[in-house]
Amino acid sequence: MKKQMIILIVVFIVSLCNFAFAKNMLDNPIVSDYKNNSIIDTRSTRFVHFKYTDSRKLVYCNLKVNKLHGNRYAVSIASLTGTQNIIIKDSRQNELKYTYYLSDSKGKINDYELVTGKDLNVYVTTYKGVQIVYTDTQEESMKSLKKYLDMMPAKMLVNLKQILMIPYSNTSCIAGSTKDTRITLYNFAKYDEKTQKNILFHEATHTYANKLIDEKKIDSEYTAYKKYVDADNNYVSSYSKEFYKSNNGKLSEDFADGFAFYLIDEAKFKEKYPNRTKYIENILKM
Ligand SMILES: [Zn+2]
């Protein structure tokens, strides 16, 4: 009786695992190089690539598709613009739908809502691998942004995939925010040049730090950086000081502002923060 119970429990656990495994496969059987609802700059991209992560096969696609090696496919988007759905049916009777917003030959993305409820003309341009999404009222800011990207070391841009330029101020009055590889900037035009650089470099450093953490070159507590901060015995900005004090000594904001000020005026930064400078220069060599 006892043995039967154990067998039953084991069978139950195994079937639970299988269910979780199957569900995971069902949720995410294909991996595309663009997430659902992505903006695509058709002037720099002619194909969307995707692959199956298991043995299923593609049996239908509403767009022109080329089979590459193995389970990899390339969907041609070269002649398309506007909102496009890629519908894929696989050999296990699943239908998958990806929605993409494609630019036209001038970079305009028709019917794309950058700000919910606002009827804005939205454009995309790709510069140094970074997708900049902006409105036609922000052309000057977009040009400044490109100029500032030129001032950054190439390796700091590797993990920066997209900059969304919102033409309005944020309700909490923040100038920028970063999520993984994407930066959102608010009302960029209202700031002077030095502040604009500070905002962009600061947020871009967060995307760079995310990559350094992923690659285990630094840890998320910025442990190694702390020694250099302590040696300098000061704060790089009132913002980094406030953040440090109200977040148990967290150094992510000092790190971002440190890199930003270093990029804005290296000589001045070196004079005030000689230890951080050593650290930053070492990191940039990695
Ligand atoms: Zn920050």
Image (cartoon, rainbow, N blue to C red):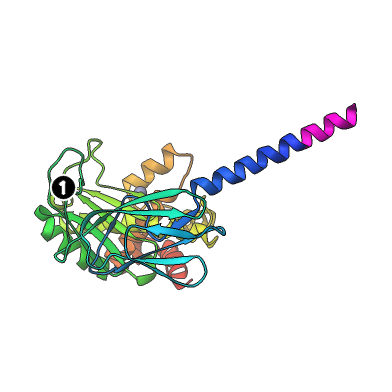
Please give the range of residues in magenta. 1-10
Of helix, strand and loop, which mostly describes the magenta segment?
helix
In the rendered image, is residue 242 in sight?
Answer: yes
Task: Give the percent coordinates (x, y) of residue 143.
Answer: 15, 64
Residue closest to the eye, 242 or 150:
150
- Residue 242: image quadrant is top left
Residue closest to the eye, 207 or 89:
89
Task: Give the percent coordinates (x, y) of residue 102.
Answer: 24, 58
Tell me what residue is drawn at x 56 percent, y 43 percent: 23
Tell me what residue is drawn at x 69 percent, y 39 percent: 15
- Residue 43: image quadrant is bottom left
Task: Give the percent coordinates (x, y) of residue 160.
Answer: 35, 61
Task: Give the percent coordinates (x, y) of residue 232.
Answer: 44, 57
In the rendered image, is residue 232 in sight?
Answer: no
What kind of residue is marked 1?
Answer: Pro
Does 194 sit left or right of 259 as displayed?
A: left
Where 33 sits versus 167, above or below? below
Disc 1 designates what residue?
Answer: 167
Residue closest to the eye, 201 or 27:
27
Q: Is residue 233 magenta?
A: no
